[in-house]
Every structure is written in structure tokens, then in C-alpha cells.
Image (tube, rainbow, N blue to C red):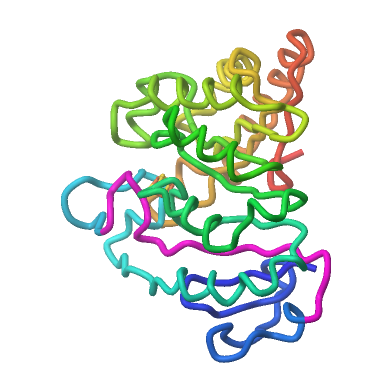
Amino acid sequence: MKITISSNGDARIGDLGKSKKLGNLLVAVPDKIQSGSGLHLELELPNFHCNIGGENPTQGQLACLMCPRSRSDFVAEMDRIDQICDLLANYVGQIDQLHIAGLAEPFWKDRIGEVIGRLHIENHPAIKVGTTTNALLLDSAACDRWFSSVQRSEVRFSIDAGTPDTYLKIRRIPEFELAVGNMNRFCRKRDSDRHTAILSNNINLLNLSELHQMVEMAKNNFCHYLSLVPTSPTDPSLLNICLNRDNQQQFMEAAQSTREFAGQIGVEVVFGATWPR
Ligand code: SF4
């Protein structure tokens, strides 16, 4: 049973598109959480928690090209994460999987560490903690903190490029090597039986020609597998470089060639459900 909690405390049950409102956690903790078991909880950090573009990406450093944080109508979401965690701490025993999500970078100002600390995850080694990171803040100390407080995890590394030039176009900062180096350190330090690492990239016409480099990157940096998902157009200006009717044949051919190449060098590749077949 999946329950998603927004950064303002609003809770929903079920998968996206079919979810039902459960009310606000800070008003009343839903019965489904109080009496549930084997919960799959998704906690969304607020959209101003990110190192790329910072707290107000409409001024100064821009957010990533494809990110809704880049839109001129960006409005910071309410941050009630600490209060939410303090309430959830009473029900951690019911949680099976905890996913720290949201349009945010979880390692920004170690917010994910604070969430894990407030929930006392260290007392619940069976909980699997999942998140997606751009890897830029996952330095050696952050890795050590992660492995000392989380016993089971699934971390998705969103690099979104196979070369520094494309990385610069998409992330708008020249930090490709830093991101890959941090992913590499995390993967080498981890116990791979307990910590899954996935190279998880969004694909559009800017990086579609780099899928083979991404396969090699997954192999050279010891990721469990490579996940490829078409980028969602978060703004009408992105429609022409995102998957559409005119370019779907290009996506299909790239997938075929990538499957063959990955098979030759022994890398598992998973294409998202929206990839054309
Ligand atoms: S795509 Fe991710 S890393 Fe980039 S600005 Fe958005 S939340 Fe931050």
C-alpha cells in the first residue's frame, strides 16, 4: 500500500493518477498509517530544496533545463517536513519502504539525513530507503553518513548525460566529472547486497545519441543496472526535443541498438513504460 505525503502534509493513497486523498497528516494521522503494516511511504521534499538553481531558481543560477523548477511560474512549496517526520516517527514500525522523493535534491543541506534522523531509521534496519539524487552533494562524508544510518537502500543516480557537453546543456553547470565521481565512490563503498545503485536517466533528443556511453557508465561505475525513461515535457518549449510522434522511430532505433550493445558488455538496461515499442 503506497501512501504519498506532500511537503505540506497532504496525504494520498494509491499510485499517481489513481490516488485518493487521505487528508492532511498534520490535522489527523490517517488510519491507514496508524493501523497499516508493510507501508510503502513516499515523502516529498519541497521544491526549493536543490543545489542546482537553489531556493529561488527564477533568479540567479538556473535550475536544470528540463526541470519544472525552471518555469517562470515557480513558487516555493510549503516545508512542513520536520513536523511530518515527528508525527511519522510514532509509526515507523509499520513502514516497509520509505521513499524520499519530490522535485528536490535530497542531499541538499543534508535534508535527507535530517529526515532519516528524525524518523530514527537506524533503529529499523529492515526499512528500505529509496531516493533519487543528482550526486553532486554525495561526497565521501555524505556516503559515510548514509551507510551508517541506512541499512538497506535503493539510490537512483540521475546524471542525464553521457558527456560533459551534454551535461552542461541539461544541468547548466560544468560538473559532469564531479557527479560521475561521486556516483562511483558511492557504488564502490557500498555493500551491494544491501544497497542498490541505479543509473537512472531521462532521455530526450539532447542525449539520445549517448545511450551507449550511458551503458558504459553504468558498467564502469558498478551500478546494478541502467534505467532509461523519456523526459516528460514540463514546458511547451520542450515539446520538440522530448519524445513525440515525429521522433518516436528514433527512440525505438536507439533502444534496439542500446539493447544489443548492453548485451555485448553485460549491462542490464530497463526502458520505462512510456518508451515507444
Ligand atoms: S532536475 Fe533535479 S537537480 Fe535539476 S533542478 Fe530539478 S530537482 Fe534540481
- Quarter of the image with the N terminus is bottom right
Image position of 24 with respect to 267: above or below:
below
Image position of 164 with respect to 31: above or below:
above
Of 68 and 120, which appears nearest the observer?
A: 120
The quarter of the displayed image where residue 193 is located: top right
The residues colored magenta run 35-55
Residue at 31% in and 65% down: 74
Image position of 35 with respect to 149: above or below:
below
Of 245 and 251, which appears nearest the observer?
A: 251
The quarter of the displayed image where residue 171 is located: top left
Q: Main secondary structure of the magenta part?
A: loop
Residue at 44% in and 27% down: 140
Name of the residue lying farthest toward the top: 264
Of 82 and 161, which appears nearest the observer?
A: 82
Residue at 73% in and 77% down: 33
Image position of 30 with respect to 166: above or below:
below
The reply to whether the magenta stretch includes residue 44 is yes
Q: Position of residue 194 (x, y in %)?
A: 74, 35
| Direction from residue 200 to residue 76 in the image, left or right | left
Name of the residue lying farthest toward the front: 123
Residue at 34% in and 32% down: 169
The reply to whether the magenta stretch includes residue 176 is no
Q: How many marks?
A: 0
Q: Position of residue 65 (x, y in %)?
A: 36, 44
Q: Position of residue 195 (x, y in %)?
A: 69, 35
